[in-house]
Amino acid sequence: MTIASAIDYQRLSFEYQPCADQRDGQAGGAVHPVVVVGAGPIGLATAIDLAQRGVRVVLVDDDCTLSTGSRAICFAKRTLDIFDRLGCGQRMVDTGVSWNVGRVFLRDQQVYSFDLLPEAGHHRPAFINLQQYYVEGYLLERAQELPNIEIRWRNKVVGLEQRQPGTPEETVALTIETPDGCYTLAARYVVAADGSRSPVRKLLGLDSKGRTFKDRFLIADVKMEADFPAERWFWFDPPFHPHQSVLLHRQPDNVWRIDFQLGWDADPVLEKTPERVIPRVQALLGPDAKFTLEWVSVYTFSCLRMDSFRHGNVLFAGDSAHGVSPFGARGANSGVQDAENLAWKLAYVLDGRAADSLLDTYASEREYAADENILNSTRSTDFITPKSEVSRVFRDAVLGLARRHAFARKLVNSGRLSVPAVLHGSPLNTPDVDGFGGTMVPGTACVDAPVSDAHGAGWLLQHLGGEFTGLVFGSPDSFDGDSRLALEQIEKSGLPLRIVYLGTSTQAVSGTAILRDDEGLAAQRYNAAPGTFYLIRPDQHVCARWRRIDAQRIRDALARASGAQLPASKAHESAAMAA
C-alpha cells in the first residue's frame, strides 16, 4: 500500500478479516508471544520494534481507520531517531516541516526567540511538525512490510483474564468482539497502547490519578497560503485574542495549526461552529486572509498517570499509562520512548536471554519519565493559564523582564519542549567510578554526531544499532597492552555485545571496521579521550562508561543492564576448575 496524500490517509478504511483464532474455537488457539492493543502511533511503534527483533506480534484495534485532524503534530529529535531505527524516519522528515526556532510574544511585541538546536552536527532537526495521520500511515506501511506482524481491524477487547498469575506459565486471555462475534485471544504478554480512555485499564479495574485543568482550548487546522516561517510562535494576551493565549505551527500541505485558549466557561459545542471559529482566525490573520477550515476540535486536558505501568503480564504504554497537556509536545514523544524501552526488554525475556523481572525496569523507568513530563507539563499550564490575579501579575512581570534580561527567559514557560528523560536511578545503570564531565551520564539517551566509515559519511546513532554495544574511543592499534588484552577477552568471550570503534581513521584492523570522528564532535559530546568505553543499551541509553577498558567491569555492567546470565569469563572458569 502506498498512500499519496493527507486526504487518502484520513479517508482510508481497512477491512475486517476473520482470523485463525476464531476458526480454532472459543477456547482460542496457540498462545501468541505478544498482543498489542491499539494501532495508534505507540501501538504501531511497539509492534514494529518487536517484529524487527524477531518477535511475532498480533496488533488489534477496535476501529478500522487512521486518525483525523492534526492531533499530535510535534515530533522531537529523539523520536525521529527512534523512527529511523523503525525504518520510516526519513519519510517522516521528508514530509514534515522541520523547525528549531521558537518565538514568544506578549501582546503584539516579541519578547525573545530561542533555538532548540543551536549547534551543527546533528542528523535530525530539533522537531518536525507532521500530522498524526501521516505518522500513523507511515508506521502502518512499515508494519505491513514485516511478515511477523498480524493486524486485526475491528477487533475490540471486551474481556481480560490473567491465567496462572505469578507463575512462569502466566498468560493473558483477551475476549475479542468482532462483527462475527467474540473469540478468545491468548498471549504471553499484552501491551495496552489503547489511548487515554484505555478499555484494557478499565477491564483491570485500574485508573489514572492526577490533576484536570479547568480550561478549554480550540484547535483549528487552517489551510492557506502564508509567509509565516516554519517556527513555533506563542502569544500571551495578544490584541487579536485578549486575555488568553494563542499558539501557531506550520504543518505540511499548507495547513496551519492554531490553538486558541478559550477559558473554562466556553461552550465546547458552540465554539466548534464555523461562525465562532472563522472570526477568531480572521482576527489573527487579517480580514482579507483566504483560508479554509480543515479540522476543528475543542479540548480540555489532564496531567495524570497510573500508579504502575505493569500489572502482571499486561504492560501499559503511551496515553493509556500517562497523560499530559499538549504544551511541550510530551505526549506522543514520551509514548514512542515507552515503546522503545519496552520492546527490547520484551524481546530479551521472550527469547530467554533475560528474566521476566527485566520488565519491572520498564515500569520503573517510564514511570520516572512520566513524572518528569507531568511536572514540566503542569508548570507550563500554570504559567500559560494563571488561576489567580497574583499568578497573572507574576507571569506578566517575568515576560516584561525577559525582553531585556536573559535570566528572566529561564522563567518563561510557554511549554518546556520534549526532551528524553535521563534515567538517573535506573537499576540497569552502573554508576561512574572514573572522573567524567559532560552530560552523557548513565541513563542518558545517546546523542548523535557526524562520523564516517569505509563506505562514506554517516551518523553515529546509525552505527550503534539496536543491541548492546560497546562504543570504544580510539582504534585497536592505539591502545596499551592491558587495553588490547581486555578488548581481545571481550571479543572472544561470546558476550552479547557489539564493539564499535570510533577513532581518527576508517581503516580496518584485523577485519574490524573503525568509524572516524569527522569533526571531533563525538569525543566532545561524550567527554571522551582515547581508551574511553561506553556501554550502550539496545534503546541507545548509556548504562555505563569508563576511562579505561576493563573486561570484568564491562561483563558485570552488561549482566546488570541486560538481566542476563552471561557465559562465564576465563577468570571465573579457572577459579571454578581450581575449586
Image: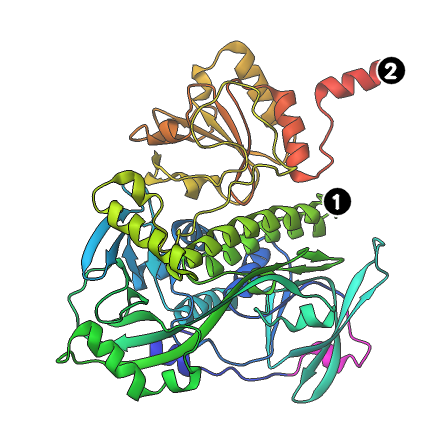
**Up-down: is 44 above or below 453?**
below
Report the number of discs: 2
Q: Identify the residue shown where x is 66% and y is 73%.
A: 199
Q: Secondary structure at mark 1?
A: loop
Looking at the rendered structure, the kind of residue marked 2 is Ala
> Is 397 positioned to the left or the right of 430 in the image?
left
Residue farthest front in this picture? 390
Query: Does the magenta-highlighted stretch encompass residue 219?
Result: no
- In this picture, is 406 found above or below 58? above
Give the image quarter of residue 117.
top left
| Most foreground residue, 19 or 138 | 138
Q: Which one is in front, 272 or 42?
A: 272
Residue at mark 2: 579
Residue occupying the point 85% across, 54% down = 167
Nearer to us in this view, 507 or 360 = 360
**Magenta-highlighted residues:** 18-30
Question: What is the secondary structure assignment of the residue under circle 2?
Answer: loop
Foreground tag (2 vs 1): 1
* 276 to the left or right of 181: left
Q: Is residue 86 visible?
A: no
Residue 459 percent coordinates (x, y): 36, 41
Circle 1 packing at 10 Å, graded few (<14), some (14-19), many (20+), is some
Helix, strand or loop for the magenta stretch, by majority = loop
Q: Which mark is residue 355?
A: 1
Quarter in which the N terminus is drawn:
bottom left
Q: Where's residue 292, x and y in %?
A: 25, 82
**Is residue 28 one of those drawn in magenta?**
yes
- For the residues labelled 2 and 1, the Cα–Cα distance comes to 28 Å
Query: Closer to the N terminus: mark 2 or mark 1?
Result: 1
Q: Can you say whether 19 is above or below 363 in the image?
A: below
Q: Looking at the image, can residue 533 be seen?
A: yes
Q: Residue furthest left?
A: 288
